């Protein structure tokens, strides 16, 4: 894993185009959490009683925007991790935009890409196991 000079601004542009949507969603969750929690339903959980890997995500988001970190972690740990990683990456993208000499991309070898994929799959499975334990036991 190494940093190389940025060859395309696509990642930064995608981050900047998604960020206003996320800010709008967070403002909505901040202003009307009860409404959001009433309309958010998991079809899999409604039909089978079994939570999906993203169950509790809306609850975790409402807890995050109200700074209840431990409640957010209990609702869905993966949402908290993804939110933290997104904030770090978006902050880095903003810094690289403001200071062009900092523009770098992460270069991964084929083995590192495979490892990252397996790590993501493992985190998803562990998160799902946490949710099954939380909702069923």
Image: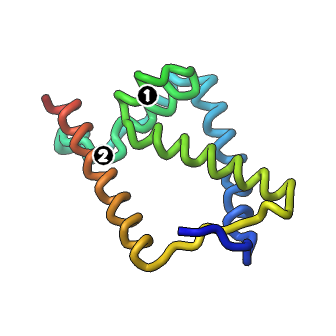
Q: Secondary structure at mark 1?
A: helix
Instruction: Give residue 75's position: percent from left, percent from top.
Output: 36, 30
Residue 108 lies left or right of residue 129; in this view the side is right
| Residue 8, percent from left and from top | 73, 75
Q: Would residue 44 be found to the left or right of residue 106 on screen?
A: left
In the image, residue 98 sits, relative to residue 8, either above or below, namely above
Residue displayed at 86% across by 56% down: 99
Q: Which residue is mark 1?
A: 72
Q: Is residue 6 above or below residue 70?
A: below
- Mark 1: give few (<14), some (14-19) or many (20+) Cα within 10 Å: many
Q: Which mark is residue 57?
A: none
On the image, the x and y values in percent for residue 15 come to 68, 57
Snapshot quadrant of residue 101: bottom right
Please tell me which residue is depicted at 64% across the width and 68% down the height of the picture: 3
Q: Quadrant of the rendered structure where residue 98 is?
A: bottom right
User: Label 2: which residue?
Assistant: 43
- Quadrant containing the C terminus in the rendered view: top left
At 82% from the left and 58% from the top, the residue drawn is 97
Q: Is residue 105 left or right of residue 58?
A: right
Q: Please state the horizontal and vertical placement of residue 112, each as a whole percent of the image.
A: 43, 71
**What kind of colouring is applied to the model shown?**
rainbow
Given the current orientation, which residue lies at the most extreme left position?
A: 137
> Is residue 59 or residue 122 the one in the foreground?
122
């Amino acid at each position: 894993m190494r940093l190389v000079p940025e060859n395309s601004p696509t990642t930064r542009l995608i981050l900047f185009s998604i960020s206003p949507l996320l800010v709008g969603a967070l403002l909505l969750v901040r202003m009307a959490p009860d409404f959001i929690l009433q309309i958010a339903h998991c079809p899999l959980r409604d039909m089978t009683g079994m939570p999906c890997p993203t169950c509790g995500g809306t609850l975790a988001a409402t807890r995050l925007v109200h700074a209840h970190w431990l409640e957010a972690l209990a609702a869905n740990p993966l949402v908290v991790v993804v939110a933290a990683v997104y904030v770090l990456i978006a902050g880095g993208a903003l810094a690289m935009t403001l200071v062009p000499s900092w523009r770098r991309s992460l270069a991964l070898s084929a083995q590192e890409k495979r490892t990252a994929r397996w790590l993501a799959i493992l985190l998803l499975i562990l998160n799902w196991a946490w949710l099954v334990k939380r909702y069923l036991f």
